[in-house]
Amino acid sequence: MRQLLEDDGHDGNYDDRSAAFAAAVQAFHGGIAVLLLMRGADASQCAPAELLSLREAVDSGSPALVDALLDGSIRDRYPASELMEMRDLARSWYEAGTEAELRRRTGSADDVVRTRVPDREDDTIGELALGGVTVRDGHGAILTRLEELLGVRASCEELIARALEGDQHHPAWNEAAILLSHRREQETWSAAEALRADADPSRRLFGAELLRLLELFADSHEEEWCVLAKDALTEWSAEETDSTVLAMLLWGLRSYAGPRAEAALLAHVDHHDAGVRRAVAAGLGTRSDSTYLSDEARDALLTLMSDPDTDVRIEACHSAGQTRTGDPALTDAMAALLDHPERRVQLVAVYGLALHEDERCVEGANRLGPPRPGYHDEEMACLEVAWRYKWRREDD
């Protein structure tokens, strides 16, 4: 779908995309419908009869499908009374449990077929099939979304309970975490602190994400909740034993400029888990003063750029590029990655060298050629930096 949208060009005619949006909704492909909206489809060009009803979308259990039908251009088609009814429908599914409600509706005693499928672009969700009916288990996320639209405030405890019925990739987790992190108040902070002390790693992981988002969405680094979150992330990372939770904590330090955060990251450079090392690589050298890089952080980035894990190398190279210091050791390490067998590593090496204004980025970009179909935006973000460097050099 991305490739087709890229091939469609930029002619300003989005009628085909709007028709494709209607087709995607009718086929219950919520993720594709949302992607089309992001790429210029206009939901208001679709008559109500061309789309599913909101009730059908809620029954489907797909948060992406509900999001598509609640797009801002058509949201006023649904009066508050209908949204309240859909909130109650989502709640009935959620409280009964997806499998129990599916059995009640189908009357089937057969075994449920369960699979894990993508819903929105960054989410995966459970899909259940029984008696010729297929639904997804996203009713908790749908409930949270509808409550937010209606201005209905669910308690912190209830939102956490919805999140923890899935994992960190489930839309219910993401909806609850984002909503709670925007409630910059004592209740949210107390909940995160309580989760920090929980024996269950999945509950600690949600608490770590809350802290990460409290820091991420702060208006400034001096905001009260941001300062508290940074301190808690730093202290917690020194004592956490679960690798997944630790990685989340270290990701939370990525935008924090300060020696305590750097020390917390450096403590885990040699961690056995690649996810933790990737978080370390992403956070080093990201101070607001981008020309600053301590000797310890520089050495750590050099080590991580030769890490056996490809994703760690990519993050380390990206962070090294962001420093823009022109340090020969860093640029030589990035240049060595131009010969890496994976294209995505070569791309970030070109990007990093261009930020350091190292002419080797031009040769690297020329060898890579134009972006691959279907990956245009991601690859252009790296290649354009090198091309701009080349044009500036030619102008001089």
Image (cartoon, rainbow, N blue to C red):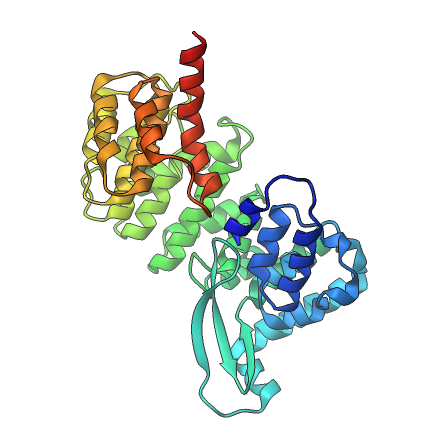
Q: Position of residue 214 (x, y in %)?
A: 50, 40
Q: Residue at x 75, y 50 (%)?
A: 73
- Residue in the foreground of this view, choosing between 55 and 326: 326
- In front here: 37 or 181? 37
Residue 155: where, in percent of width, then height? 59, 57
Relative to 299, say whether 21 is above or below: below
Q: Residue at x 27, y 43 (%)?
A: 342
Residue at image coords 28%, 34%: 316
Tell me: 395 left or right of 77: left
Which quarter of the picture shows residue 284? top left
Task: Judge whether 396 appears above or below 132 on screen.
Answer: above
Percent x, y of residue 263: 27, 30
Furthest toward the top, the residue is: 396
* In-image side of 235 versus 16 (left or right): left
Q: In this orientation, which residue lies closer to the viewer: 336 or 216? A: 336
- Side of 369 where 317 appears, left or right: left
The answer to whether residue 25 is visible is yes
The residue under the point 31% across, 18% down is 359
Residue 256: image location, x then y, percent: 40, 30
